[in-house]
Image: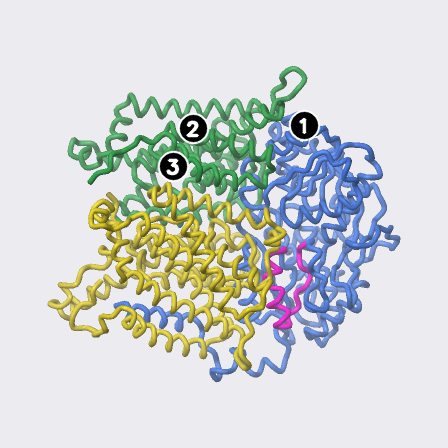
Chain colours: A green, B blue, C yellow
């Protein structure tokens, strides 16, 4: 029983991290119909920015915030410099550019900070919380992980539902031409979308680094699981990324604990295939009428 | 259009691939080279290697080749070997056998290396073993603990270096069986040949009945992406009081973190591959903001075939540190990887010296088989090399880590992967004059 | 694309036409393999085998419009099937290679079944899942696949007097040329045209009596079969079949190679393969051998590779082949304004644009 509880808690905290990555992918997919392979690499970059600030003994929360801010800026820059010229070009081009960026950014990170693993300070203690005589596989840091991703999700929900910017973002995603006609500056909105997405990725990087150690390739598998989460949840649904992320996290944790970890990735693969064969556009997709 | 572009692309191939000198039927190498030995001139010896310098397999391993190179640079700076300076060409194969093949062929066919020395990895080096042997290029001091390198009849050019994982597992297993008998034991190992061979060795010594839980993690890059919390939870739930890890350093650190999170403090027994204190201490800063990181290692038991890194009285270690400081431009810390890389360098330098002034590929192979067991290198045991044995080092001592200091707690043992474990009684070997500068 | 009038007149019968194109290419390649060094011959084998895999992917993605992030996995299937055959039976080389093609094609067909219901990124998700599983399965069934050490494949024995590198280059080139001819034929057949119709407008195509689902499965199977052939040759080329060779990054690089070369174009597949093989080569020679001053050089080599992918995509959005075609059109229009103006612009004809 305690094993089940611990696997659930462990799965939850990884799950919400996958959800944050998935959210980034969803924001970009909704806005620009691009699968952003560079998302993970950009999050690695912002995590290294944080670690080099830690090394200079700069206040922890300042470094944390600086990394998140760097995510916003880098996301906006990538959209402006690399993605903007590609709209209207064959749809795979931005995807391939993001693959190129993935390779480029990871190599630059390796060249600057070295290829080795590095420890990464957690925001709070990683010692499990004590309940009676047992320690849960859930620390104050895990509480922070859960809380910060939920806050991020809630903020996005508020942004999309109730703010002007959010409304414009939704409008530009679903009907760019119409939005442009009614005076929405679609270009700026797309930039904002990429910035927010990279921000979400940066948060995921800062949360996962203490749990898996920092290295230039740290985010590769996290991105894969985040992508799985996004597909499971539905790429058009920000809430779907939370559902997909938690499903992926729990799935991997249970498989690892009960069937052995050598089944983890295969299990994740089976999860994706099963969910998509039941719901071809993810759990939270809306059935759409086919246009003729 | 199709045809035109197609021919263009062919033309491009022709332009990129350097046209061969000489007639179409003869290989690219100029005839004059044939008379001499490939990769050796009066002033130079060209050696090559492939190793992961980037990618998921690079952490830690990327320190090894630069350390080996530093030893060569040091010898070069002191006049070289019989007046020849070593040129060490290292290519980054990212631990992908396809890239290993690509770069090894380039090293052999374009760069004309004399020998492939200190290349890293089991699948990667298996991928080029056939090629190097058919080209009669020595494949020396392979950096892998696979028990598969010693096949002198089939692969006369291939030589292993470090003790194989089975031997290591047996020596650690014997210690556990002897000193912790009756305790429940848990295993956590990488689910590939490294972990499985280690467990094979452990199983020879530890009775199956006392193994309460066996957990694995994937050796692929996704392996650590979900941490090791679920595995450690399962081992804790099994009631194991002793946990043996066949893990890489990152996985050791994550296992220790996961256990600390659960307030689970078993006796850790960790393979030398994943027990390097400086590396682990660096990784464990994430535990309580660095203050207590090293304390998690206290009491950890491991094994070693090179002298404990913290033994600053050891002459080899003093030599290595001074060489690395001066000649390894990427040297950041003295740890298990740099110690290992330097030892590979020493092995090769001594081999080149022993092979004599008239260096040939067949000469170097026969020298290694004949005299290899007499080489004085930094390891705790000598090489086992002979005509029928291409393994290399074949023993280790069990050590204990306390406050970052590694100290031996058993004599040095030697073993083969099929034979019994025996005590090694020989003395540590002094530094030979070629390395005294 | 129909050849513009006033140029080379080739027979209308597709097979004959493609064979006529292949013959001089083959002759030229023969000359090339005879005149370059053994090392360059190994590079030629490598280019040929990547070209086959990319061409297969191009048929799927460029022509049928389905994204696959799992072609490395199909290569693995072909490589393991061929490798196991070679390990256990002593048959003429062509048998294990064809078995690899067949097994990969069959697996592709099975994967193609869910693909009939999935679109874009969701299909990418499923094929990505496949790529992940493919890297894991060999260690799960290690008694059969020999875990992560992999299966050793002995190089093919060349006839007396032919260096092994050249022999392998010939085998790979023959396989590549046969594949190109067959794929070109397929694309010009009724199936190929129907496939494009399905891609462009599935509902209209169904209205014309085209069975879209069956066609998509067929496209997947053919594409996977090509990857399987590439995998079999890969096994011969590396001499080992092990999971580390077929990581997710291989699948991603194949996709990048396809788009960089020119999506949907068989000639583009060769450009993509050249890029995958030669760009790392160039960057290596640029930096010299790694000076080992640090891992910086190794990382810079990869950085240049990533940057080049980005730059090519920005400069030549239709890939290298599209860019060349555009250049050719421009030159012809410049030389003879009349004849060229009638030719459609292939750069836009074969690709979809963003909505």
| The stretch drawn in magenta includes residue A278 | no
- The quadrant holding residue B205 is top right
Give the percent coordinates (x, y) of residue C144: 60, 53
Give the percent coordinates (x, y) of residue B219: 59, 45
Residue on which the image places disc 3: A25
| Res B281 seen here | yes
Q: Residue furthest front?
A: C209
Residue neighbourhood size for the residue with mark 1, other residues' Cα within 10 Å, grouped as few (<14), some (14–19), many (≥20): some
| Res B437 seen here | no
Q: Looking at the picture, does residue B314 appear above or below residue A169?
A: below
Whole-angstrom CA distance, mark 2 to mark 1, is 29 Å
Residue on which the image places disc 2: A243
Q: Looking at the picture, does residue A2 appear above or below residue B147?
A: above
Q: Which residues are magenta?
A: B122-144
Query: Is label 2 or label 3 in front?
Result: 2
Q: Are marks 2 and 1 on the same chain?
A: no
What secondary structure is marked by label 1? helix
Q: Split into 4 quadrants, where in the image is the C terminus of chain B?
A: bottom right
What secondary structure is marked by label 3? helix
Query: Is label 1 or label 3 in front?
Result: 1
Give the percent coordinates (x, y) of residue B433: 78, 63
Marks 2 & 1, CB-CB < 8 Å contact: no
Name the residue nearer the viewer: B170 or C282: B170
């Amino acid at each position: 029983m305690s094993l089940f509880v611990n696997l659930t808690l462990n799965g939850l905290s990884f799950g919400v991290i996958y959800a944050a990555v998935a959210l980034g992918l969803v924001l970009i997919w909704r806005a620009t119909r691009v699968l952003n392979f560079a998302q993970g690499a950009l999050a690695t970059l912002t995590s290294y920015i944080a670690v080099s600030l830690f090394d200079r003994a700069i206040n922890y929360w300042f470094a944390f915030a600086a990394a998140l801010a760097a995510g916003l800026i880098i996301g906006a820059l990538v959209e402006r410099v690399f993605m903007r010229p590609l709209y209207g070009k064959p749809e795979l081009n931005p995807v391939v550019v993001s693959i190129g960026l993935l390779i480029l950014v990871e190599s630059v990170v390796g060249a600057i900070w070295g290829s080795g693993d590095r420890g990464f300070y957690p925001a709070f203690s990683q010692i499990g919380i004590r309940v009676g005589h047992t320690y849960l596989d859930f620390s104050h840091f895990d509480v922070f992980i859960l809380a910060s991703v939920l806050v991020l999700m809630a903020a996005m929900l508020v942004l999309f539902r109730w703010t002007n910017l959010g409304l414009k973002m939704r409008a530009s995603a679903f009907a760019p031409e119409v939005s442009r006609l009614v005076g929405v500056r679609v270009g700026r909105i797309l930039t904002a979308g990429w910035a927010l997405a990279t921000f979400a990725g940066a948060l995921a990087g800062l949360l996962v680094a203490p749990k898996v150690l920092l290295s230039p390739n740290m985010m590769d598998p996290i991105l894969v699981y985040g992508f799985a989460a996004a597909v499971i949840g539905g790429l058009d649904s920000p809430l779907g990324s939370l559902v997909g992320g938690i499903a992926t996290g729990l799935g991997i944790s249970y498989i690892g604990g009960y069937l052995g970890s050598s089944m983890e990735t295969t299990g994740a693969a089976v999860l994706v295939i099963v969910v998509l064969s039941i719901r071809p556009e993810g759990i939270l997709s809306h059935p759409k009428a086919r246009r003729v | 259009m199709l045809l035109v572009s197609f021919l263009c692309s062919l033309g491009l191939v022709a332009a990129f691939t350097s046209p061969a000198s000489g007639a179409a039927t003869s290989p690219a190498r100029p005839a004059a080279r044939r008379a001499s030995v490939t990769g050796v001139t009066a002033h130079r010896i060209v050696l090559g290697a492939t190793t992961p310098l980037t990618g998921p397999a690079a952490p830690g391993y990327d320190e090894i080749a630069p350390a080996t190179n530093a030893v060569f640079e040091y010898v070069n700076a002191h006049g070289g070997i019989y007046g020849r300076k070593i040129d060490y060409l290292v290519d980054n194969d990212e631990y992908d056998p396809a890239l290993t093949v690509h770069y090894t062929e380039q090293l052999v066919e374009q760069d004309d290396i004399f020998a492939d020395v200190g290349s890293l990895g089991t699948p990667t080096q298996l991928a080029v073993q056939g090629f190097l042997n058919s080209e009669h290029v020595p494949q020396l001091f392979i950096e892998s603990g696979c028990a598969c390198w010693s096949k002198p009849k089939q692969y006369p050019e291939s030589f292993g270096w470090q003790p194989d994982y089975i031997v290591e597992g047996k020596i650690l297993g014997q210690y556990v069986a002897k000193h912790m008998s009756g305790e429940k034991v848990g295993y956590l190992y990488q689910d590939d040949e490294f972990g499985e061979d280690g467990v094979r060795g452990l199983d020879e010594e530890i009775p199956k009945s006392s193994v309460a839980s066996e957990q694995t993690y994937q050796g692929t890059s996704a392996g650590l992406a979900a941490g090791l919390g679920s595995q450690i939870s399962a081992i804790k739930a099994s009631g194991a009081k002793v946990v043996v890890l066949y893990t890489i350093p990152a996985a050791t650190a994550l296992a220790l973190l996961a256990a600390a999170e659960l307030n689970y403090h078993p006796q850790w027994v960790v393979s030398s591959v994943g027990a390097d204190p400086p590396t682990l201490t660096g990784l464990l800063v994430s535990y309580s903001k660095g203050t207590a990181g090293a304390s998690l290692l206290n009491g950890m038991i491991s094994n070693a075939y090179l002298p404990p890194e913290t033994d600053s009285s050891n002459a080899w270690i003093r030599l290595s540190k001074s060489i690395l400081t001066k000649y390894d431009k990427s040297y950041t810390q003295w740890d298990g990887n740099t110690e290992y890389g330097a030892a590979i360098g020493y092995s090769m330098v001594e081999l080149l010296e022993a092979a004599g002034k008239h260096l040939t590929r067949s000469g170097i192979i026969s020298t290694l088989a004949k005299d290899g067991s007499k080489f004085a290198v930094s390891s705790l045991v000598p090489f086992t090399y002979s005509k029928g044995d291409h393994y290399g080092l074949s023993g280790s001592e069990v050590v204990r880590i306390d406050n970052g200091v590694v100290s031996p707690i058993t004599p040095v043992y030697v073993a083969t992967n099929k034979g019994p474990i025996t005590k090694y009684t020989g003395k540590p070997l002094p530094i030979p004059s070629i390395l005294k500068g | 694309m129909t050849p513009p009038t006033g140029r080379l007149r080739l027979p209308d019968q597709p097979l004959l036409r493609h064979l006529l194109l292949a013959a001089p290419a083959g002759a030229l390649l023969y000359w090339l393999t005879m005149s370059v060094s053994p090392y360059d011959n190994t590079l030629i084998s490598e280019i040929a085998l990547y070209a086959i895999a990319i061409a297969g992917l191009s048929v799927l993605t460029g022509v049928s419009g389905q994204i696959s992030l799992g072609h490395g996995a199909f290569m693995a299937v072909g490589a393991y099937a061929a490798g196991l055959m070679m390990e256990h039976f002593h048959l003429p080389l062509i048998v294990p290679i064809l078995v690899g093609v067949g097994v990969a094609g069959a697996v592709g067909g099975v994967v193609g079944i869910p693909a009939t219901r999935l679109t874009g990124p969701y299909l990418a998700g499923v094929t990505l899942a496949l790529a992940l599983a493919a890297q894991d399965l060999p260690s799960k069934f290690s008694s059969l696949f020999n875990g992560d050490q992999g299966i050793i494949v002995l190089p093919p024995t060349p006839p007396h007097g032919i260096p092994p590198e050249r022999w392998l280059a010939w085998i790979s080139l023959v396989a590549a040329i046969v594949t190109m001819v067959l794929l070109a034929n397929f694309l010009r057949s009724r199936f190929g045209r129907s496939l494009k119709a399905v891609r462009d407008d599935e509902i209209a195509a169904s209205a014309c009596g085209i069975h879209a689902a069956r066609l998509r499965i067929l496209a997947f199977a053919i594409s996977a079969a090509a990857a399987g052939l590439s995998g079999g040759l890969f096994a011969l080329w590396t001499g080992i079949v092990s999971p580390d060779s077929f990581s997710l990054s291989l699948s991603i690089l194949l996709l990048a190679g396809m788009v960089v070369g020119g999506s949907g174009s068989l000639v583009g597949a060769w450009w993509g393969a050249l890029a995958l093989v030669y760009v790392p080569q160039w960057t290596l020679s640029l930096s010299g051998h790694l000076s080992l001053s640090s891992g910086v050089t190794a990382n810079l080599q990869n950085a240049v590779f990533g940057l080049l992918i980005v730059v090519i995509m920005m400069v030549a959005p239709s890939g290298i082949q599209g860019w060349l075609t555009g250049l050719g059109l421009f030159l012809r229009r410049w030389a003879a304004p009349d004849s060229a103006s009638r030719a459609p612009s292939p750069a836009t004809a074969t690709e979809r644009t963003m909505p």
